[in-house]
Image: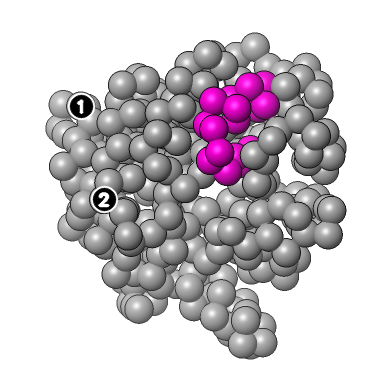
Amino acid sequence: MNSRFSGILAAVFSPMDENGKVNTGVVPAIVDSLVADGVSGIYVCGSTGEGPLLAREERMEVAEAYTKACKDKMPVIVQVGHDSIAEAKVLAEHAAGLGADAVAAVPPTYFKCPSVENLVDCMAEISEAAGDAPFYYYHVPALTDGVFSMVDFLRLGEGKIRNLEGIKYSALTVFECQECLNYAEGKYNILFGCDEMLLSGLVVGVPGAVGSTFNFAAPLYNKIMDAYKAGDLERARELQLLSVKMVNTLFKYRGQPAFKAMMGILGVDCGPNRLPLKSLDSDEVAALKKDLEDIGFFDWGRTR
């Protein structure tokens, strides 16, 4: 089984100041917090990091700040997908030049790929711009409508994407995730991307996961992994149910904006969201904090 990346990898935020301008001065504090929480790597400029809402120069700035802050601490995957393949190639070359440990990409989402063959061709162009950096396809059909078979993607990509390393698998179809894990005798590194279903991913064999809520609840997820590895499935189930309660609470407050607000609640202010995402106002932040207190999150979600 390919385990180039394993454990808990946080899909990090792109911090902004009160005026909505990228504020990379916060990045070292974010990284220090993740290291202390036992995170094993980060994923930059993905959905959590609002990558599709940032300008090219901003994405480069964020990638550079995280790559620098993570040096000798943890590996970095930079997501470079863009509706313009040409732009994605520029971002891929830049990320590889920074020394990112891997590059990932979502598919185009305005003019969509009409077939899995076309998707592979698009990813092949982007990946080639990354040089020798390992390449991951970011499968997140809820946001991209990319519903092609990922086993077919691996089969076709095997011959066309020279540096294909794996998939960030952010879909609920765990059975297909298992197929990908076992394709070509476990050749590819498949990272799971559904936080509230981490245990399901572990059962089918994922070596690691990338998630939004790992930014502020990594201790909980590390305990889930530890319990599963120790064979204590009952404890792992109990802990996973706590994750479900936390995620359900966060989605009462629009999901991603609530995730970002959590960082401020915990003392690392990552600022507002970019439109069309709507940031939580002060009353919503207070209500979110109370709801999390009511379910005991600050007792079980943060205890290392």
In the rendering, which numbered label is found on residue 221?
A: none
Q: Earlier in the sequence, mark 2 or mark 1?
A: 1
Type of the residue with mark 1 = Lys
**Residue 238 magenta-drawn?**
no
- Residue lying furthest front: 132
**Residue 35 is at least partly visible in this image:** yes
**Residue 136 magenta-drawn?**
yes
Q: Is residue 12 above or below residue 275?
A: below
Locate the C terminus by quadrant.
bottom left
Q: Is residue 10 left or right of residue 227?
A: left
Q: Is residue 278 above or below residue 233?
A: above
Q: Residue tagged by mark 2?
A: 69
Type of the residue with mark 2 = Ala
Viewer-closest of 188 and 167? 188
Quadrant position of residue 143:
top right
Across and down, in percent, residue 245 comes to: 50, 64
Residue at 49 percent across and 69 percent down: it is 221
In the rendering, which numbered label is found on residue 21?
A: 1
Locate the N terminus by quadrant.
bottom right
Quadrant position of residue 303:
bottom left
Q: Secondary structure at mark 2?
A: helix
